[in-house]
Amino acid sequence: MAKEIERKFLVRTDGWRAKAVSKAILKQAYVASMEDRSVRIRILDGENARLTMKIGRTSMTRDEFEYDIPVADAEELMERAIGIVIEKTRYRVPHEGFVWEVDVFGGTHRGLIIAEVEMKSENDTPALPAWLGREVTGDFRYSNQALATEYQYDRHALSHSA
C-alpha cells in the first residue's frame, strides 16, 4: 500500500507553462464514492488505464492502492460511472526539487486549473512557485472525486484566481 501525501493549489497565472516538461490527456471517473473512500478509473492518453482506490480523508495523506487494467475494461467502467467523466490535461512542472502536476480541466470544468505537489512526508516544505494561487488542500470541493460526483464547476464559487 502506498501513501498519497499532497498539497493542492489553484493556479492564478500561466507562468508554469514555459517550464512544463511533459503533458498527458486524462479521462477519469468514479465507480464508488463515499465520504472517506473512492474507487476511480483513469485512462491516460487513451493507451493505459488504472484502477485506484483511495481511503482516508485527512487534508494531506490518504492510503492509495493502484492497479493497471485493460483500457477496454476502463472504458466499460466509465460508462457505469457515478456523475461525470472528468477530462483534463496534466502537465508536469519541476520546481526547486519537487515536481508539480498542473491539471487544466476541460469539458464540464473548463476554466479550472489546479496544481498539486506530491511529497514524501507531511513535513516536506516545497518552495511555492509564484504562479500558484490560493491553497485548497483539504477543501473537498476541489478533489477530483467531488468534481466528478457532486460539484459542477462555477467560475465564481470555485475561482482559479487567488
Image (spheres, rainbow, N blue to C red):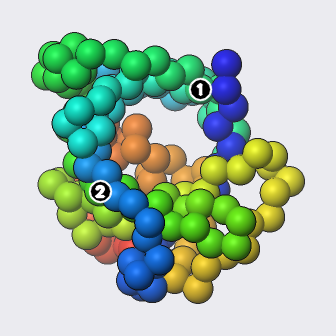
Q: Position of residue 65 (x, y in %)?
A: 56, 20
Question: Within 10 Å of the Cα at label 2, are there few (<14), some (14-19), or many (20+) other Cα atoms?
Answer: some
Residue type (three-letter) at the residue carrying disc 2: Thr
Q: Position of residue 78 (x, y in %)?
A: 20, 24
As helix, strand or loop, the secondary structure at mark 2 comes to strand
Residue at the outermost right position: 123
Residue type (three-letter) at the residue carrying disc 1: Glu
Viewed as shown, does residue 35 lie left or right of 160?
A: right
The residue lying at 57 percent from left, 67 percent from top is: 94
The residue wearing badge 1 is 64
Residue 116, quarter of the rendered image: bottom right
The residue lying at 80 percent from left, 64 percent from top is: 125
Given residues 125 and 80, the one toward you in this image is 125
The residue wearing badge 2 is 89
Viewed as shown, does residue 108 lie left or right of 144?
A: left
Given residues 15 and 22, the one toward you in this image is 22
As helix, strand or loop, the secondary structure at mark 1 comes to strand
Q: Position of residue 129 (x, y in %)?
A: 61, 79
Query: Is residue 26 at all visible to an observer of this figure?
Result: yes
Viewed as shown, does residue 126 lie left or right of 110?
A: right
Choose the circle earlier in sequence order: 1 or 2: 1
Query: Is residue 158 at all visible to an observer of this figure?
Result: no
Residue 20, quarter of the rendered image: bottom left
Residue at the outermost front position: 21
Given residues 3 and 8, the one toward you in this image is 3
In three-dimensional space, the C-alpha distance between marks 1 and 2, rounded to whole angstroms, equals 22 Å
Residue 100, quarter of the rendered image: bottom right
The residue lying at 47 percent from left, 60 percent from top is: 92
